[in-house]
Amino acid sequence: MTPEKEKSILEIRKRLLKWYRSHARQLPWRQTKDPYKIWVSEIMLQQTQVKTVIPFYKKFIKIFPNLKSLARAEENEILAQWSGLGYYRRAKLLHQGAKYVFENYQGIVPEEPEELKKIPGVGPYTAGAISSIAYNRPSPLVDGNVIRVFSRIFSHPGHAKSGELHKKIWREAQQVIDPKSPGDFNQALMELGATVCRKYLPSCQRCPLQDECTSYQNNTVEQFPETPPSTQIISLTRVVAICQHQQGILFVKRHKTRWFEGMWELPHDYCQSEESAQKTLELLIKNQLKSSMTQPVKISPSIHHITHHKINSLPWHGKINKIQPCKKTFQDFGFFSLNQLKQLAIPNFERKVLQKAKIL
């Protein structure tokens, strides 16, 4: 490392930590050093905005206050509390991870990143976060915010999804991390990327690292990191059956599902177009539920985005009597009242449909 770069790193540490300790947002997971609670927050924050996570985190920690309570809970209990947060595989892996720690580490979350990465659902980023924030170990972490900050400071070429750029930023993060306050430093990097060094319209005028940022000096900030190749959006159309029996709405659990394993879903099937939706509905109810719907009423459609899929849901609401769901397709079913729906593990996918039908 050159003397110039070493000096620059010392300045980055000093200025960033000073800024963070004055400007950090007061977030609930920043009020603790409990590795379990930090772990939960980091999993929830993956691909989800802070303002969305806060109420879910508070509720989740109240119900599952420690690792033991989470490890001993049933999966459906955890999914019910995660319901509405999305990306449900995170919750399932968190549960598996809690059980793994309980069984292999006597319920104590390990300190070393290499041990942490053995836990289901814990990758290099989460391992670095737990190790540095909870245990004050100089373990780096790299997420989208950190990639953006370092790409701009050092004017690194490459787009945000580039494996080569990721490796370079990991090496940089290892060099730059403050050995005395690694947890605060890592959080400061992420905070800077989230609130100042934003993807669009960054607030360079209030950035503490102006003098160390080569892209700021060259007026090229928004050129870094480069824009990755666009992902093709796949459009899908599905027909949804809101089947009412007395005061309950029919929900099912499928043996195999594309996105929501273990969750309760409204009966549905995919179709080629809106024109074929009603025929698909009839076949779904006849062949998969062995029943018929009385006077189905078409409900306004809803759009939901999952990864790179855009899904158009076309719901019908009607009464249904005896059903005999296909055992090859469904592992469970039930009619649930409004109060029960509020506690049921159902994805946002279906909540939108029920809201359009004025049921939720």
Image (cartoon, rainbow, N blue to C red):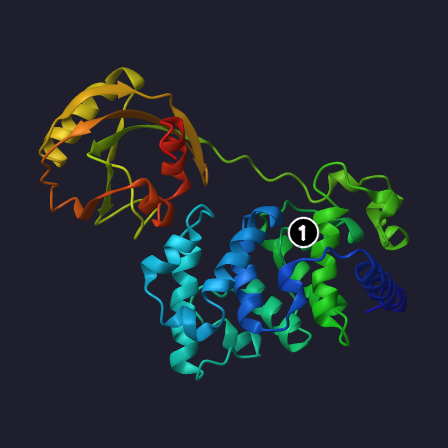
Q: Secondary structure at mark 1?
A: helix
Q: How far across and how far down the image is residue 322, in percent?
A: 9, 36
Q: What residue is at 58 percent from the left and 53 percent from the top?
A: 54
Q: How far across and how far down the image is residue 349, in percent?
A: 39, 38
**Residue 257 against residue 184 in the figure, above or below:** above
Looking at the image, residue 49 sits to the left or right of residue 353; the answer is right
Q: What residue is at 14 percent from the left and 26 percent from the top?
A: 283
Looking at the image, residue 142 sits to the left or right of residue 6; the answer is left
Viewer-nearest residue: 151 or 242: 242
Q: In the orientation shown, which residue stands out farthest toward the top?
A: 275
**Residue 349 against residue 111 in the figure, above or below:** above
Disc 1 crowd, CA 10 A, few/some/many (<14, 14-19, 20+): many
Viewer-nearest residue: 77 or 236: 77
Q: How far across and how far down the image is residue 88, in percent?
A: 41, 52
Looking at the image, residue 59 sits to the left or right of residue 77; the answer is right
**Residue 258 against residue 127 in the figure, above or below:** above
Q: Which residue is mark 1?
A: 145
